[in-house]
Amino acid sequence: AQKVTQAQTEISVVEKEDVTLDCVYETRDTTYYLFWYKQPPSGELVFLIRRNSFDEQNEISGRYSWNFQKSTSSFNFTITASQVVDSAVYFCALIYNNNDMRFGAGTRLTVKP
Amino acid sequence: DVKVTQSSRYLVKRTGEKVFLECVQDMDHENMFWYRQDPGLGLRLIYFSYDVKMKEKGDIPEGYSVSREKKERFSLILESASTNQTSMYLCASSPPAPNYGYTFGSGTRLTVV
């Protein structure tokens, strides 16, 4: 079965704190793609990052970083020095062989000033 | 700016009504998808289409149907709306290759009373 688990339902931090959002996935496919999306209050899902199963390099983009570990089937997302504008629901997602995207339940992040 | 447009941001319908949710994309994407989003459940796939006049059931197709008469338009139909179909509905599109991920619309929040 293809499955994405985001165990953290809600996280609340104070501005400038670092925060990590966890994502664990299950798939039998050897080729797959992992994504993170941000959903601000406006509702539209905004693409953040894509990773394929053959690329385990971690990535940093400004205050955002991603840690992909196939050994633990995890694709975690860290925001450094969080800001109020980071408040949103964050979704981890998996695409496997038939191009269907499966989402985790999402993590609601609240960053307080 | 490429986009996926959902015709209504908010809808209120009565139980038993036939409801049409429209989605149009301007990226010439082959694939289109309909999801519903509920708290704690993430996004769940209702139907998808890989080509004009083609449709496939997702994980929760019961109570829904779809229509894709033109490449750019994918309609979700609630044949007889029920209160348990009150939800946020998100449309997405993508090119054939799975590694590109999806582009999402802003969503339609449907309330069935």
Image (cartoon, rainbow, N blue to C red):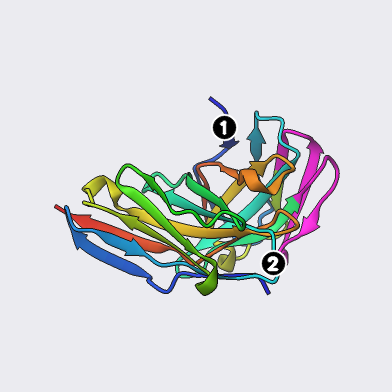
Which residue lies at the image location 72% right of the left edge and 67% below the top edge?
B62
The disc, 1 or 2, on the residue closer to the chain's N-terminal end is 1
Q: Is residue A112 left or right of residue A36?
A: left
Q: What is the span of residues highlighted in magenta in the rendered image?
A: B49-74
Front in this rendered view, residue B17 or A50: A50
For label 1, the SS is loop
Do the dots labelled 1 and 2 sit on one chain? Answer: yes
Choose top left, top right, bottom left or bottom right for residue A79: bottom left
User: Outermost residue toward the left?
Assistant: A113
Query: Marks 1 and 2, how far apart in space?
Result: 25 Å
Give the chain of mark 1.
B
Q: Is residue B86 left or right of residue B17?
A: left
Residue A102 seen by the camera: yes
Residue B112 seen by the camera: no
Choose top left, top right, bottom left or bottom right for residue A13: bottom left
Which residue lies at the image location 41% right of the left edge and 67% below the top edge?
A22
Q: Is residue B20 above or below residue B37?
A: above
Q: Amino acid at mark 2?
A: Asp
Q: Is residue B51 magenta?
A: yes
The residue that mark 1 highlights is: B3
Q: Is residue B95 left or right of residue A70?
A: right
For label 2, the SS is loop
Front in this rendered view, residue A54 or A81: A54
Q: Amino acid at mark 1?
A: Lys
Q: Is residue A59 magenta?
A: no
The residue that mark 2 highlights is: B59
- Measured as percent of width and height from the top left, residue A28 is found at 70, 71
- Measured as percent of width and height from the top left, residue B99 is found at 65, 47
Give the chain of mark 2.
B
Instruction: Name the quadrant of the N terminus of chain A.
Output: bottom right
Which residue lies at the image location 38% right of the left edge and 70% below the top edge?
A9
